[in-house]
């Protein structure tokens, strides 16, 4: 039989992983193309031969998802695999309907065909939505594991938005490594907080190779998930973060609901900001679909380095990009801090948006009076810098996980907002971790 002509729909992450672990050396399938969406500028590349393997000596083209129907017809696609995250369930089925209408089969791939196995204990931190606060939970888990005497290495969900041949296996232990790999703002936001406390982070494209390198430096691996995607590795302890500011989303988004259903621990974050009715709905949903999971409730504590540049000022709030774009939050901690510390007003940045930042507002019309810190390439970083400096404000509130002043020249006074979780119920994450035997295969 001829191999099944296959198209993989992705966003430069899960799509490459699924290909590497299932399709690359599988003679039953021929991957004719990837499509790309969500992330600006990631289409038009080629998945290179060094990664695609001997069956694909010319590599595999990465095409825009907006041409999906045309690609299926022109390339005689028989199977289309959806391989990216944070999609409403109805959108998943709309994409499936389009694929089926074009004559191809539609597939979602699960743990048995995509998760690799580590020789070390694997603790996973994932979420049900982008922007739920999983990074703060990851940092808290790392702190606890280190206090217990473990050597912890973090493996981060992929963000290979540059030269894929150079990003096969990346190791981050210093800011110099961030520069060496030409990291985007989005990558820096995930890696820098770990580097700041001396934790080594691995990421890249080939997650089998990444895992084997990380295992040489650790006795526990922490999988730090991206968006609301599933882990790439079999978790021995699965921690999942839910967001009561978006109640009901834990059962309405793919594949976040899958994460919730396989969770051992569910962290309800932001309980200090959410209405009681939201919290009740989220608790009820957790207990209904994951009745055996331990529930930890936590506040998201905000720390500001200079309140005087907020109080009584007209401020620009700059927020974490993914949280307020495809995460669909109207605002983040920058706007929250501005209100909490009595800013005179939030200045609307939309009239000042330049280039790719202007296009971001057009693509995500739900955005309000906040500026998403988009930086998927040098040009977009410069567009962001020019937009910030064009806004007529007294000061800038940086609600991003990194200090943008280190990579751009912000001409107005800037205030840095940091945030960490504080558990409000017991047992805490630390208490649960100390009472859990961490050994590979405990849950498999």
Image: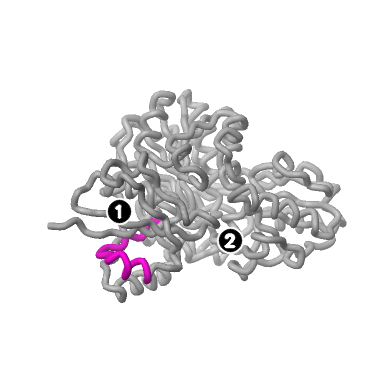
Secondary-structure class at tag 1: loop
- Where is residue 130? Give x, y as percent: 52, 55
- Report the disc number at residue 325: 2
- What distance separates the C-alpha of mark 1 from that of mark 2? 26 Å
Identify the element where label 2 is drawn: loop
- Residue 432 in view: no
| Depth order, front residue of 428/341 | 341
The 10 Å Cα crowd at callout 2, few under 14, some 14 to 19, many 20 or more, is many
75 in magenta: yes
**Residue in the picture at 41% in, 59% down:** 35
Q: Around disc 1, counting alpha carbons within 10 Å, would you say few (fewer than 14), some (14 to 19), or many (20 or more)?
A: few
Q: Is residue 125 in the magenta section?
A: no
Spot occupied by residue 322 in the image (x, y as percentages of width and height): 57, 55
Quarter holding residue 40 = bottom right
Q: Residue furthest bottom?
A: 101
Query: Which residue corresponds to the image point at 71% horizontal and 61% vertical from the top-left?
Result: 354
Q: Which residue is mark 1?
A: 110
In the rendered image, the vertical position of residue 184 relative to residue 109, given as above or below: above
Asked where in the image residue 123 lies, by quadrant, the reply is top left
Q: Residue at left 30%, top 47%?
A: 56
Instruction: Give the residues in magenta.
Output: 70-84
- Residue 329 locus on image (x, y percent): 60, 62
């Amino acid at each position: 039989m001829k191999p099944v002509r296959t198209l993989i729909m992705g966003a430069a992450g899960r799509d490459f992983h699924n290909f590497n672990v299932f399709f690359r050396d599988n003679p039953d399938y021929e991957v004719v193309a990837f499509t790309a969406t969500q992330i600006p500028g990631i289409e038009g590349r080629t998945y290179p031969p060094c990664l695609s393997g001997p069956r694909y000596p010319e590599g595999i083209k990465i095409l825009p998802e907006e041409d999906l129907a045309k690609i299926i017809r022109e390339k005689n696609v028989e199977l289309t695999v959806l391989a990216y995250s944070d999609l409403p369930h109805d959108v998943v089925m709309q994409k499936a309907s389009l694929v089926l209408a074009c004559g191809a089969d539609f597939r979602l791939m699960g743990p048995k065909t995509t998760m690799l196995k580590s020789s070390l204990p694997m603790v996973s931190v994932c979420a049900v939505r982008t922007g739920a606060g999983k990074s703060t939970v990851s940092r808290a888990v790392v702190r606890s594991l280190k206090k217990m005497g473990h050597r912890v290495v973090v493996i981060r969900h992929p963000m290979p938005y540059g030269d894929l041949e150079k990003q096969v296996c990346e190791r981050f232990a210093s800011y110099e490594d961030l520069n060496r790999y030409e990291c985007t703002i989005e990558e820096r936001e995930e890696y820098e907080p770990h580097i700041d406390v001396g934790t080594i982070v691995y990421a890249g494209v080939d997650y089998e190779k990444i895992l084997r390198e990380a295992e040489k430096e650790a006795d526990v691996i922490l999988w730090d998930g991206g968006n609301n995607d599933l882990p790439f590795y079999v978790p021995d302890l699965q921690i999942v973060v839910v967001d009561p500011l978006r109640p009901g989303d834990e059962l309405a988004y793919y594949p976040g609901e899958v994460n919730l259903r396989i969770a051992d621990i569910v962290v309800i974050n932001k309980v200090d900001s959410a209405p009681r009715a939201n919290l009740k709905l989220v608790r009820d949903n957790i207990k209904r679909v994951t009745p055996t999971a331990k529930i930890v409730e936590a506040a998201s504590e905000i720390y500001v380095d200079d309140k005087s540049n907020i109080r009584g000022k007209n401020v620009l709030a700059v927020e974490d990009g993914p949280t307020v774009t495809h995460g669909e939050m109207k605002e983040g901690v920058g706007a929250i801090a501005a209100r909490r510390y009595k800013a005179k007003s939030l200045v609307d940045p939309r009239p000042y948006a330049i280039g790719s930042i202007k296009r971001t507002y057009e693509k995500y019309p739900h955005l309000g009076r906040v500026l998403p810190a988009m930086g998927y390439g040098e040009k977009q970083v410069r567009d962001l810098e020019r937009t910030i400096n064009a806004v007529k404000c007294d000061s800038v509130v940086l609600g991003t996980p990194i200090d943008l002043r280190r990579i751009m020249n912000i001409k107005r006074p800037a205030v840095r907002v940091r945030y960490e979780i504080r558990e409000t119920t017991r047992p805490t994450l630390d208490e649960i971790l100390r009472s859990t035997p961490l050994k590979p295969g405990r849950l498999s």
